[in-house]
Amino acid sequence: SSAQLRDRLGVCVRLVGLAMPASSKFDPNGVTFVESEAATEPDVSEEVRNWVSDQILDALSQLCSPILLDCSGSRSMHPLYEKCLQRGIHVVTSAVRAVSDIPTHLWPGYRQSPLPAPPSARMLSSSVSSHDMGTTTLANNDNRSTASPQPRKKAVLLCDSCVGGRLPILSTLRSIDHNDRITVIDCALSGTLNFICGELTHGKTLSEALAAAYRECYTEIRPQEDLSGLNFAEKIVVITKQLNQPISVDAIQIKPIVPERILAQDLSPSELLSAIKEYDAEFESSVLKPMREAGKLLRFIATIQFNQSGVTAVIEPTLVDPSHPSFRLGSTEIYARIHTQRSALPLLIQGPGQ
């Protein structure tokens, strides 16, 4: 909350606008949280990036330390991000689908030094893309605005939480890549699929595990994005961009946990669940029974290899034994194990993926 940020970090945050498809609210003096909570559910049929007009962005850019917080979870948001950054508006997003679509010219070069953070913001780790700002308009205590030339500043794009949530995965990769060469990363970064695999371990069928994940709101709006490995693959794209060796989703070899014949159909969540119920028996005999007989657990794991010829990535269901770090994952936990050229032992990051 704003009170906690003020008391703990000395940061004063004011909500000045809310963008929606039918209408947008903007008031430089502040929009109340009651007004924002009363907003209707977005109509995602309209391009989300068009919800914010250029006039609103121009007005927002005149405020002190303006920030656009993207909570839409939509793809292809980079045109809006670029408009913001060009105007000196910072952008914060955790939507991996939006971040994976960001073109190279907006993505931060990994050798680029981030903006020095003020004391109140040093807790933030960020993927940073910097763009020049010009004159800044500051508000005085008596609410009058005075335009005054300020030293040229940078607008930054913060998106670390799109991979790993609260875990410092991208910031750790940046730190390592400045001092060493990363050779291999193996990881299980889909909290949703890890939850489903955990439910299978507890005796649930695949359809029951998916139903539980959907009920807990762990899945995407279209669970096919999780089951197909698409959401996981987009996180791999972000990782490779962060390491300045980008690959596309199409270049990643993905073996889904559910057959393509089911995923290829345009099914609603309830229809998808019904289709997977029919697949339960086959999944039991082909995956779960061998898993139990071998004393192993099912995990959905990616392996990313960095070498002279380029980057390769594979995502696939894998049976792991107790020696594997993913064997110990609980609920929606995730892990990333980073192998480097200099270190004989890999670095392991593990924890809640939400």
Image (cartoon, helix red, strand yellow):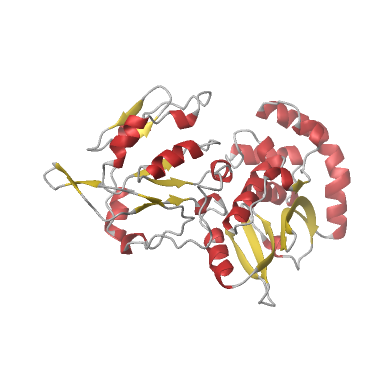
Place of residue 123 in the rendered image (x, y in percent of width and height, measured from the top left):
40, 62
Place of residue 20 in the rendered image (x, y in percent of width and height, measured from the top left):
41, 28
Q: Residue at x 83, y 60 (%)?
A: 295
Place of residue 148 in the rendered image (x, y in percent of width and height, measured from the top left):
19, 48
Does the rendering let one see residue 15? no
Q: Residue at x 15, y 47 (%)?
A: 140
Where is 53 relative to 331, above or below?
A: above
Place of residue 133 in the rendered image (x, y in percent of width and height, measured from the top left):
33, 49
Toward the viewer: 1 or 184?
Answer: 184
Report the side of 60 relative to 314 (left or right). left
Where is 76 relative to 91, above or below?
A: above
Label total for image: 0
Report the side of 86 relative to 235 (left or right). left
Report the side of 170 relative to 19 (left or right). right
Q: Residue at x 75, y 27 (%)?
A: 265
Does the rendering let one see residue 319? yes
Report the side of 130 relative to 141 (left or right). right
Where is 298 relative to 231, above or below?
A: below
Q: Residue at x 32, y 54 (%)?
A: 153
Q: Give the quarter of the image for residue 282.
A: top right
